[in-house]
Every structure is written in C-alpha cells, then in structure tokens.
Amino acid sequence: MPHRTIKQKKHSPIVRSSFLAGMMLVSSAQVYAQCGTVSIAEMNWSTAEFAANLDKIILSEGYGCEVDLVPGATNTTFASMESKGQPDVAPEFWSNSVSVRLKAAQEKGDLTVGVQLISDATEGWFISPAIAEKYPDIKTVDDVLARPELFPNKEEPGKGAFMTCPTGWGCGGVNANLAKASAYNFEKAGFAIVDPGSAAGLDGAIAKAVQRNEAWFGYYWQPTISASKYKLKLLDFQAKFDAKNWHECLSVEDCDNPQRTTWIASKVNTVVSTKFAQKNPDLMDYFNKRSYSSAEVGPIIVYMDENQASGEDAAYYFLKNYEPLWTSWVSKEVADKVKKSL
C-alpha cells in the first residue's frame, strides 16, 4: 500500500484550550495521587486539634491525600516518630521539652522540622486574676512562693498548690525539675505539685477558680482560650535564660541539679518524618508556609469554646472566614479545590 499523508484536523481555540486544561488536570491529579495515605497527630489541646483538622481538610481536598488522624501527646508522639517514623506529621509540636532528642533526630536524618507554626507562642507559670488584682505586688515566682497560704492545696492542707500539666506532656518534667531544691525549692516554700489529670482537668480548674474569684497558680501557655478569656497573669522567673541548664538538665527526666531560668522561648513547629518529607515536596512547601499569630488563632479557639465546636468544626470555620490568610499558603489550584469542597 502506498504511503498516504493524513491531514490533521484543525481544532478551534476553544477545543485546544479545553484539551490543554484537561491535560493539566490529569497531570496535577497524577502528582497529588502520589501523596497516598498521610497520618497526622491530633494532640489533645484546642489549637492542636484545630491545626490537625485544618491540615486534614487541606491535604485531602486540595492535594488528594487520604488522611488519618491519630491521637497524640508531645512525648508519646515524639517517641513514636523517633523510633517508627509514624505518624508522618505532628502539626503543632511544642518542641522545647525534647529539644536535645529532636536535634539528634534531625542530625540523624529521621525527622524534619518546619517553620514556626504559631509565631508568638509563650509558655510559663501564671496566676489567676483574683490574685493579680487583689495583690498587684505579686509579679514574680518568688512573690508567689512567699505566700503559700494564698494558694491553698486541697489535697495537702497547709501547703500551697502548683498545678502542673497533664501526664504525657513534655512540660511536666520541666516543671518538676524547676520545683527542686536547687531551683525554686517548692518543698522549702511549702508548695506541692498537683496533677490536673487531663487537659480538660487543667482548663476546668482554671475556669472554676476564675468563676469563683479564687486563687490559682500553675503552668499554662498562650495562645489559649483560658489565658485570654480569663486574663491569666504571666509571672517573671527573675532569671536569665540558661541554654545549657535547660537543654542538658531541665529537659531531662529527674535531673539532679536544675538551676533557675526563665522559660525557654516557645518553639511551636510542624515536625515531619524525613522519609515522608522527601517524598512530598509539594506538601512540605505548604507546611513551611503555614503560620499564624496568637491574634489570628485566638478567635478560632474561642469559637470552639463558645460553640462546643470540634477541631474539625473550627477548621471549616477558619477556612470560610480567613480565606486571605490560608490561600497564601497554597497554590491557586489547591485553594480552588479546597474552596469548592466547603
């Protein structure tokens, strides 16, 4: 059969543009299909619940990932990521309490740390407004420790009460070390550490004290519902930050000779398994752009509190009401997909 030239059919500009658009969508779908299953730690406090659910919606709707949320807490989640590389992502990881181990995991190449998630986060020891207003001279930790009678301990009558964070949170070990004789010497001051039992127990104790106009002294952080809603007062540790003391002693369980120091500047990062990070550069681009301030996330957690809303409810509320912020973290294509799903 002799060779026959086949004339190409000319397509209209509309047909050609539709074809190209279709090819782009196919190509994009292929890229996002590589995401596969992502496991995300949902920590047991409001901002972390919000962050985990926000990531779940954006990754599933915008990037085509299949997302599993797994319950988490600072120490347990880190230990799992450190040894098993799971979960893949810890969206809101307060890393100070495990800074030495985290640095070692980074150097080893097991974990990757993203940018600061909450730009102005703060941890420390606070007192309730009832005390702050009635005794304006109480401004430091030593001021509080000199007045144990103002913070009566119901579990140990005759002693003052300091409420630490729930078991499993990294701050618990730091609080215990700071309470030792070589630092703030709770025993000599007549104070005992009280475990709230859970995040709900800690928040409940603060709310109860404020509503009854009673004293409360303990560990807390911001941005939080309780810190802003109840106007907790942050105390001055009256000491310079000592990095060696913090990293080599205070952050270590049962350190023998902890020294006084102010609380380390809060680092609230997204921690990701390095294997996952290397396979998903597009998602890492998102994680490294995703950041907000206390003023931006504060109204979200207040919304959760006032409406008995879940982390998922809060995430949808945020996506609907803070579009200029979150769309700056992703491409227009991803943003359009997320907006279409709302």
Image (cartoon, rainbow, N blue to C red):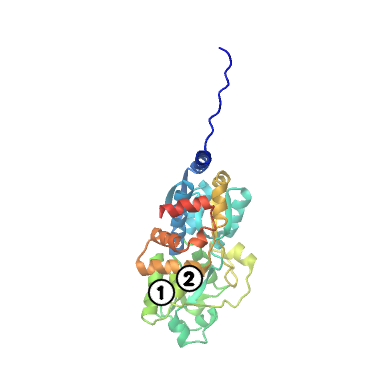
Label disc, if present, on residue 206 of the rendered structure:
1
SS of the residue under disc 2: strand
Pointer 2 or 1: first along the chain: 1
Residue farthest toward the top in the current orientation of the protein: 1
Answer above or below: position of 75 versus 228.
above
How far apart are the two marked residues, 2 and 1, measured between alpha carbons?
10 Å
- Residue at 44%, 64% in the rendered image: 321
Q: Nearer the viewer, residue 286 or 138?
A: 286
Q: Which residue is mark 2?
A: 220
Mark 2 in CB contact with mark 1 (< 8 angstroms): yes
In the rendered view, would you say 47 is above or below 21?
Answer: below
Q: Of the numbered discs in the image, which one, if any, rests on residue 301?
A: none
Could you tell me which quadrant the N terminus lies in?
top right
Residue nearer the viewer, 156 or 322: 322
In the rendered image, residue 96, in percent from the top left (x then y), is placed at: 56, 62
308 w.r.t. 162: above or below: above
SS assignment at label 1: helix
